[in-house]
Amino acid sequence: MSTPLIELKHIRKSYGGGDSPQVDVLRGVDLSIHAGEFVAIVGASGSGKSTLMNILGCLDRPTAGDYLFAGENVAHLDSDALAWLRREAFGFVFQGYHLIPSASAQENVEMPAIYAGISAAERHARARALLTRLGLADRTGNRPHQLSGGQQQRVSIARALMNGGHIILADEPTGALDSHSGAEVMRLLDELASQGHVVILITHDRDVAARANRIIEIRDGLIISDSADSTRHRPASADSADSAALQAVDLRQRLAEGAEHNGAWKAELLDAVQAAWRVMWINRFRTALTLLGIIIGVASVVVMLAVGEGSKRQVMAQMGAFGSNILYLSGSSPNPRTPLGIVTLNDVAALATLPQIKRIMPVNGSDAGIRYGNLDYLAYVGGNDVNFPQIFNWPVVEGSYFTEADERAGATVAVIGHRIREKLFKQVSPIGQYILIENVPFQVIGVLAEKGSSSGNKDSDDRVAIPYSAASVRLFGTYNPEYVVIAAADARKVREAEQAIDQLMLRLHNGKRDYQLTNNAAMIQAEAHTQNTLSLMLGSIAAISLLVGGIGVMNIMLMTVRERTREIGIRMATGARQRDILRQFLTEALMLSVVGGLCGIGLALLVGGVLMLAKVAVQFSLVAVLGAFGCALVTGVVFGFMPARKAARLDPVKALTSE
């Protein structure tokens, strides 16, 4: 005799135990079902027939006993192999239809094929063919609430047949239908049985059970009778019996070889994305509130970093305008008890011979009062030589700079900064006008380009440049410079130039370090580090709102899992593995984060545009934008993982019976 397709040996199923009383639902069931049989399992409510169906369909595991499917002990199969059996071998027809409310009839039918890895084109064609065969050709796009009870049950039958449906498990398929719809469903089951499908019908109605070729009665968890009725109903034809036997052999072989459990992740991912979008759209208001946290979080991070980067670049540009290769040399006290060192013009002349130096300029200056007409202003007045525009990269935008002849002659000419021009001359052209510097008249011959302030220092445009000789003789009474500005020959070798200057100055000053060298590049780097720290702090503060958004994602995902528990059970019954369910809900969490992240970036760009119009320094960085978006995705995955794992670990039977 051939090996039974399904064989149960001493199957027991109990619930409770421990602190609660143990309830024995099945108490030692022995049952064999061969390919091609149409079996009806009858019994009153509470007799254990639904529990038996759940065990037969691999939705539940027995407490004790052996379940052999095609000769393979199901107890030895892992959860993925059980999902494969549900997907490839079984097709479920439930009393309550168990269709996913948000999916169309065709999408409900296609679900088992998605987990089986069938291509989209083949899925669509097969689902449409099945629905057409069952008289629902014009209802493929309808959702369950748009279908009658009989139509919904036909959709569930089509879903059971999607992957072949070798074994149809029908649990009270006519219980929720009127007599006409019930007769239609039973006619379909008769037709499937005649085609060689194993049909296992669970019912309490003996008239319905009478349609089967074999009737098994169960009472109080035990099979009390098992008979075949061949007098009134024709058994499956020889051809259909042969087909059923071949199907059984195929299932045995594939199960013995080890089924492929990978499915088609692309199809599953697409289905997950579509399902996620439907859920988000159906619950638009709740989704919007959840997205608000992510949107504000991403926008805050992007804007804060953009403002920080804009401020940094503005300051760096202002500082860098004076040259990143600039060094400053001035007198200093080796210790508090010694007088201030003096850098002389002889020192300047000696330093000018170093090959590491491109230009050198003594500066003799101080803050001084400036008067034009009846207006007074306090600004820095510096005696410089003709290297000033080149060494500071500071051009003259009106008039001209003084010449070497002016320097030799000690001419009382002045080139003023942009701010002084605004404060003293307003709309009047300053060229050719006279100003009083400490009551000494100087003629304005030029105006320097605007530079602004750097890092909160005094505005650089509050400056007057005059010949060094005129400053020494007419204003300050000394030829020794206040400080010396040095331009290194190579901006990449400022440190080498600094070392050469230090060695020469030590020789000139007899080993006494009564001077101070300041590296402008180091100042710029320090300022950049400060600005980076500030930007990071602002971004970190803004990132807290992303955390709040993540908590919102977790909250909505927990609500979604609770609301869609039955859907999870349906997906598991049609062959979804735990990782498929995990992927489904992680995809939904990720979808929320993607939409929130994109909207957040859009909001950040809008806010940035407004700030730019308000003359706020804003500099968007692609790295910052992508980083904030990436953080939103990570937040969605991290906070969505726990609800997704909870969904994946649900018991299929409990999920299907949830309200």
Image (cartoon, rainbow, N blue to C red):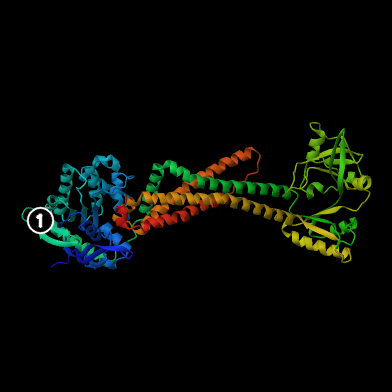
Residue 607, percent from left and from top: 58, 41
Name the residue: 55% across, 45% down: 299
Residue 116: tell me if it is visible.
no
**Count of marks, rendered view:** 1
Residue 91: tell me if it is visible.
yes
As rendered, which of 469 and 527 lies closer to the eye?
527
* Badge 1 element: loop
Q: Is residue 11 above or below residue 437?
A: below
As rendered, which of 21 and 553 lies closer to the eye?
21
Residue 374, percent from left and from top: 87, 33
Q: Quadrant of the N terminus?
A: bottom left
Residue 452, percent from left and from top: 74, 43
Q: Which residue is mark 1?
A: 235
Residue 159, percent from left and from top: 26, 50
Most extreme residue toward the top is 427
As rendered, which of 573 and 494 lies closer to the eye?
573
Is residue 351 toward the left or the right of residue 35 in the image?
right
Name the residue: 28% across, 64% down: 22
As rendered, which of 563 and 153 lies closer to the eye?
563
Is residue 528 toward the left or the right of residue 508 in the image?
left
Is residue 12 toward the left or the right of residue 288 in the image?
left
Tag 1: residue type?
Answer: Pro
Name the quadrant containing residue 24.
Answer: bottom left
Disc 1: CA contacts within 10 A as few (<14), some (14-19) or many (>=20): many
Most extreme residue toward the left is 231
Name the residue: 42% across, 51% down: 557
Is residue 321 toward the left or the right of residue 77 in the image?
right
